[in-house]
Image: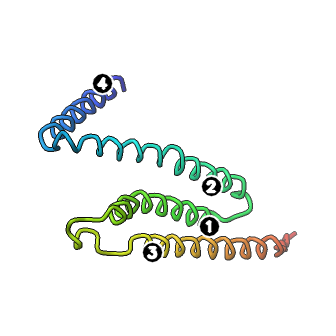
Amino acid sequence: MRAARIVLVVLGVLVLAFGAYVLVTTVKPNRIGGLAVWLIAAVILHDAILSPFVVLVGLGLRRAGRALRVWVLVVVQTAVVLGSVLALVVVPEIAAKAHGAKNATVVPFDYTGRLLLVEGLLLVVVVAALVVGSVMSRRSAGTVVETTTIS
């Protein structure tokens, strides 16, 4: 196990060094500030908004997990992850569209509307799964199974 950790650390340092080399050789110095701002914003978005949201949803699911079926929990968790990743991917396009591009074909779509549409559809799927799952749980809890013994 120790050897595997050492190999992974060395590999990680090599990947970081390669990334730094590519950054220095391909990005103009006046663009590094904008890149740093984008990276800091991504960390803040992830650590201050998305991670706490996912943790809170996970805690709620853990609490409700006793009353809901496993497939409902999987649907909700999948929707939360998909919605979070989609937001992380689309927010830069929304920002680029707001700043305006020299070439109109670079960001041609209404990314805000499309993001809201997909997030809304994910919300509908989650609500439907929760409703169906709770109805199924109530029905199975209300059904008494009779057993007979043969003597």
Relative to 48, does residue 20 appear above or below in the rendering? above
Colour logic: rainbow
State the SS at label 1.
helix
Nearer the observer, 147 or 96 = 96
- Disc 2 designates what residue? 57
Give left or right: position of 5 versus 151.
left
Depth check, mark 3 against mark 2: the one in front is 3
- Disc 1 designates what residue? 72
State the SS at label 3.
helix
Separation of marks 2 and 1 at Cα, in angstroms = 13 Å
Numbered tag placed on residue 6 in the rendering: 4
The residue lying at 24 percent from left, 41 percent from top is 32
Q: Write down the quadrant of residue 33 in the picture.
A: top left
Type of amino acid under label 3: Gly
Give left or right: position of 25 versus 83.
left
Residue 19: percent from left, percent from top: 21, 38
Type of amino acid under label 4: Ile
Relative to 116, does residue 7 appear above or below in the rendering? above
- Disc 3 designates what residue? 113
The image shows a total of numbered marks equal to 4
Separation of marks 1 and 3 at Cα, in angstroms = 28 Å
How crowded pointer 2 is (Cα within 10 Å; few <14, some 14-19, many 20+) is rated as some
From the image, which quarter does the C terminus lie in? bottom right
